[in-house]
Image (cartoon, helix red, strand yellow):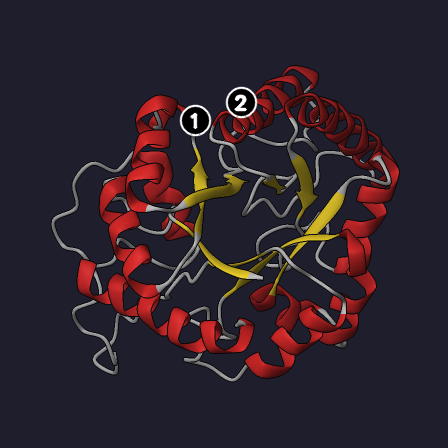
Amino acid sequence: MHLSTHNWMRAEPLAVTLKRIKKYGYESIEISGEPAQYDVNETRALLKEHGIRCWGAVTLTLGERNLAARDEGQRARSVDYVKSVITMVSELEGQIVTLVPATVGKVVPDGTEEEEWTWVVDATKECFAHAQKRGVRIAVEPLNRFETYFFNRAAQALALADAVSPECGVCLDAFHLNIEEEDMYEAIRLAGKRLFDFHVADNNRFAAGLGQLDWPKIIGTLKEIGYDGAVTNEFVAPVDRTPASKYPDMVERNPVDIPPEQLKFIQDHGSSLLTEKFYDDQMRITAETILPLIK
């Protein structure tokens, strides 16, 4: 196992992110799933300069991106988007694309259970075929019920993976597991060798170590199943808009260089643009919590 992180949680130059995470002992990064934002040659050079490898990327399934859409054209465009993320990861010598099939934040289905299952399975199979050609693994990720209606538990994600291919895997996230599973440790064991990626945030979605999750037991269960992939930091700190806030200086008041879609995605997760100091602290705390457990 090694420590990784996403970078979609704060808009900043990639070089700034890489310098920060190298300082705290991260070994890899899951690049934000927006291929248009990254010049592959420049990104590859930055990764090499800072001694950080690309582990993969997560699809930012927002807006019109939806493999469960009734509209065939919308599904086709969504497949093209996922393929573009896969291609980016391949060109950055990464291994994993974490696939969230349905639009994050969408809670009303477009069709019956049978219709949507057929749409998603067919679309994911097409994405998987492209991933195989590019030497990238697909890991489908369940989110909690407040972010998607489509599936929320490890068993459901495995059902989709099974419908696609024995070589399709799943990604689990401790924050979502804590909400949806009867027993998060059994969910990890159920995934077993099909667990290709693992995301971490505490039960309050702050950095690992700032909530109530039992990180020694979580990491111990990952070791029990022989998991040897990334443990990827994905905190999404909720903003306290009251005088009770413990972090009055967490929100960046003068944001620059962030696409409106990414800002909406962050805000839809109950967060906002975070100041560099607050963000840096969250990165450090996750590393201080997780690294001693995985080494």
- In the displayed structure, does residue 148 sit left or right of residue 39? right
Q: How many marks?
A: 2
Q: The N terminus lies in which quarter of the figure?
A: bottom right
Query: Which picture quadrant has residue 165?
Result: top right
In front of the other: 174 or 138:
138
Above or below, 1 against 163 in this view is below
Which residue is located at x 32 percent, y 31 percent?
45
Residue 213 position within the rendered picture, expressed as x and y whole percent measured from the top left: 55, 81
Residue 135 position within the rendered picture, expressed as x and y whole percent measured from the top left: 66, 28
Above or below, 75 against 22 in this view is above
- In the displayed structure, does residue 155 sit left or right of residue 70? right
Task: Report which residue position mark 1 lands on.
Answer: 35
Which residue is located at x 59 percent, y 28 percent?
82
Query: Which picture quadrant has residue 43?
Result: top left
Name the element at disc 2.
helix
**For the residue marked with disc 2, what is the amino acid?**
Ser
Residue furthest left as drawn: 254
- In the displayed structure, does residue 213 sit left or right of residue 114? left
Disc on the earlier residue, 2 or 1: 1
Q: Is any part of residue 153 visible from this angle?
A: yes
Query: Which picture quadrant has residue 237?
Result: bottom left
Which residue is located at x 84 percent, y 31 percent?
118
Q: Are marks 2 and 1 in contact (CB under 8 Å)?
A: yes
In front of the other: 260 or 163:
163
Which residue is located at x 60 percent, y 41 percent?
96
| Disc marking residue 84 | 2
| Disc marking residue 70 | none
**For the residue marked with disc 1, what is the amino acid?**
Pro
